[in-house]
Amino acid sequence: MNTRDASSQPVITSYAKAPARTVSAGGVSYAYRELGPKGGIPVIFFVHLAANLDNWDPRIIDPIAKNHHVIAFDNQGVGASTGQVPDSIEAMANDAYTFIKALGLDKIDVFSFSLGGMVAQALVLKHPGLVRKLVLTGTGPKGGKDMDKVAGTTYYDILRATLTRSDPKEFLFFNRDTAGKRAAKAFVKRLEERTADRDAPIKVKALQTQLQAIKKWGRGTPADLSTITQPTLIANGDNDRMVPSILSEDLHRRISGSEMIIYPDSGHGGIFQFHDKFAPVAAEFLAR
């Protein structure tokens, strides 16, 4: 594949070096980063609860950006994006749609994780023509069993992390066994590979509003997922404490023709713990 775009600049395929950009729409300035070769259908990355642009694992993004135009963004009120985080998943999906349209895109692939996967589902149900392929990881459907307990688990693990001076993601995303602890430390270290132009941390108020939105989503009326006809790849660890793994199976059952991978002995961050296995599978799925 040609690694130079039309402007004959070398293509950036390292997320650590992806330029920080902004686009304004609907009174909001959206922060985003893009990398990979232009042309073809771009892959939009929908990030998780409490996360900003610095929370994407380069070992997941970089292999996909080798052959795909990748765009990661902060939704309204998150990181360096302006505005307020809305208190419903559907409103977050509307904001994501506004951002995507502001970039002039009319067909995208979606790579989503956790909260991002909920927003992705709401987006594809409302704008089915926009999305070609869907990757849903560490996530679950509206009205899914125990989805409304995410907030309690999150606050508990933030407290545990504070007491041990560690990153809450080490508790929330990984098992507390030897392999899990090792994977957690490695993951947190990888998130620090970008040194210049880091994103603004998420505000406590924004996190609280995101948690309210997840609770609402968890208690909402289940959507009809049989209308999702896009090729869909679902992945998780087998021991997800945040968004129970059984919800991935629920999604798989309800989205016709979907594919599912459950990684053994891993939690919410199973795709990060097994990035060496998952990244090539995701890249192959998107390239098909």
Image (cartoon, rainbow, N blue to C red):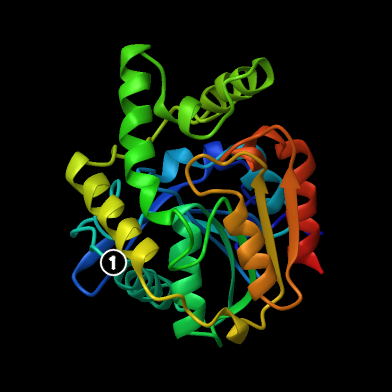
Classify the position of the N terminus by image quarter: bottom right
Please state the horizontal and vertical placement of residue 78, each as a whole percent of the image: 29, 51
Q: Which residue is mark 1?
A: 88
Residue positioned 75% across, 37% down in the render: 264
Q: Is residue 109 above or below residue 15?
A: below
Number of marks in picture: 1
Q: Is residue 227 above or below residue 171?
A: below
The residue lying furthest to the front in this view is 145
Give the image quarter of residue 52.
top left
Q: SS for tag 1? A: loop
Residue 32 seen from this side: no
Q: Position of residue 287 (x, y in %)?
A: 78, 65
> Mark 1: few, some, or many residues within 10 Å (few <14, many ≥20)?
some
Residue at the spot 57% in from the left edge and 24% down from the top edge:
184
Q: Nearer the viewer, residue 154 or 44?
A: 154
Q: Quadrant of the C terminus?
A: bottom right
In this view, which residue lies farthest toward the top?
A: 164
Residue 285: image location, x then y, percent: 77, 63
Residue drawn 56% across the image and 50% down it? 138
| 106 is higher (above) or lower (below) than 173 | below
Q: Position of residue 96 (x, y in %)?
A: 39, 69
Q: Taking 88 as reference, is 221 above or below it? A: below
Kind of residue sitting beneath label 1: Ser
Left or right relative to 165: residue 65: right
Query: On the rendered structure, is 206 left or right of 257?
Result: left
